[in-house]
């Protein structure tokens, strides 16, 4: 995707998705947003979340909200929101918590196949994908447009990542605190890897001709 140089590129949009949008996806959203902000990319990247069967309007579950705050997130005001075609279409990347959820998103919105990943899948792909040298002929209008272009290339190397049950983020709803903590740690690691990769893309974009 190439952006008109006379127009400001919109922020790169990340959407995290789970079932009810009160545990996993808001936690991933909040941690990603915090990490992006710490990298100084809050104007270039926006993060939101939604649920396939959302508990619309319900507050974030208390344990993941507490864990989010401990891990640097901002859970205040989070409320369940249903995934709609409009919300899905607006996202540059959709990060589901499990392979089943990713497949459900693609079943609902087939044209978004190249944008839908699991959280862990996207983190692993970012680790595999080498940065192109600044001399490869690319140009950039903004960090957001460069990140958008690079993320669009990841679907082509999807087959290089093998996922197992351990890579799915389990649903901790109404389960013991230990399960919530394990899930939060898994999400924290994956979101940190994603933020690291995207930050590297943003740094690379600053080296390219405009």
Image (cartoon, rainbow, N blue to C red):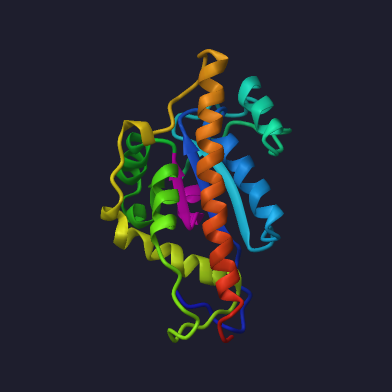
- Lateral position of residue 106 relative to residue 65, left or right: left
121 over 13 or under it: above or below? above
Residue 117, visible in the rendered structure: yes
Residue 61 in view: no
- Relative vertical location of residue 150 with respect to residue 197 in this rendering, above or below: below
Please check the rendered image and state whether residue 150 is part of the magenta-colored stretch, yes or no: no
Q: Residue at x 49, y 50 (%)?
A: 86
The part of the image, by quadrant, that contains residue 143 is: bottom right
Q: Is 24 placed left or right of 110 in the picture?
A: right
Residue in the picture at 43% in, 32% down: 169
Q: Quadrant of residue 185?
A: top right
Q: Quadrant of the N terminus?
A: bottom left
Compared with 139, 152 (above or below) is above
Quadrant of the snapshot with the C terminus: bottom right
Q: Residue at x 61, y 76 (%)?
A: 206
Toward the viewer: 94 or 38? 38
Q: Position of residue 102 (x, y in %)?
A: 36, 41
Quick one: 165 or 46, which is closer to the camera? 165
Residue 118, given in percent of the width and then of the height, sits at 40, 43
Specify start and end residues of the magenta stretch as a single range.
86-96
- Residue 199 point in image, percent of width and height: 59, 61
Residue 44: x and y in percent read 64, 63
């Amino acid at each position: 995707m190439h952006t008109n140089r006379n127009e400001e590129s919109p922020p790169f949009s990340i959407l995290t998705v789970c079932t009810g949008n009160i545990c996993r996806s808001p936690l991933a959203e909040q941690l990603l947003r915090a990490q992006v902000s710490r990298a100084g990319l809050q104007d270039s990247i926006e993060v939101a979340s939604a649920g396939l069967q959302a508990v619309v309007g319900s507050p974030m579950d208390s344990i993941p909200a507490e864990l989010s705050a401990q891990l640097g997130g901002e859970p205040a005001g989070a409320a369940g929101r249903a995934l709609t075609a409009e919300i899905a279409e607006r996202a540059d990347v959709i990060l589901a918590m499990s392979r089943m959820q990713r497949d459900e998103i693609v079943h609902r919105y087939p044209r978004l196949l190249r944008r839908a990943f699991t959280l862990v899948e996207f983190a692993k792909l970012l680790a595999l994908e080498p940065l192109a040298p600044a001399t490869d002929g690319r140009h950039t209008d903004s960090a957001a447009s460069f990140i958008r272009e690079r993320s669009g290339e990841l679907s082509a190397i999807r087959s290089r990542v093998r996922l197992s049950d351990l890579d799915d983020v389990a649903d901790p709803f109404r389960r013991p605190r230990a399960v919530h903590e394990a899930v939060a740690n898994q999400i924290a690691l994956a979101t940190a890897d994603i933020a690291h990769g995207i930050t590297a893309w943003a740094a690379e974009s600053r080296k390219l001709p405009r």
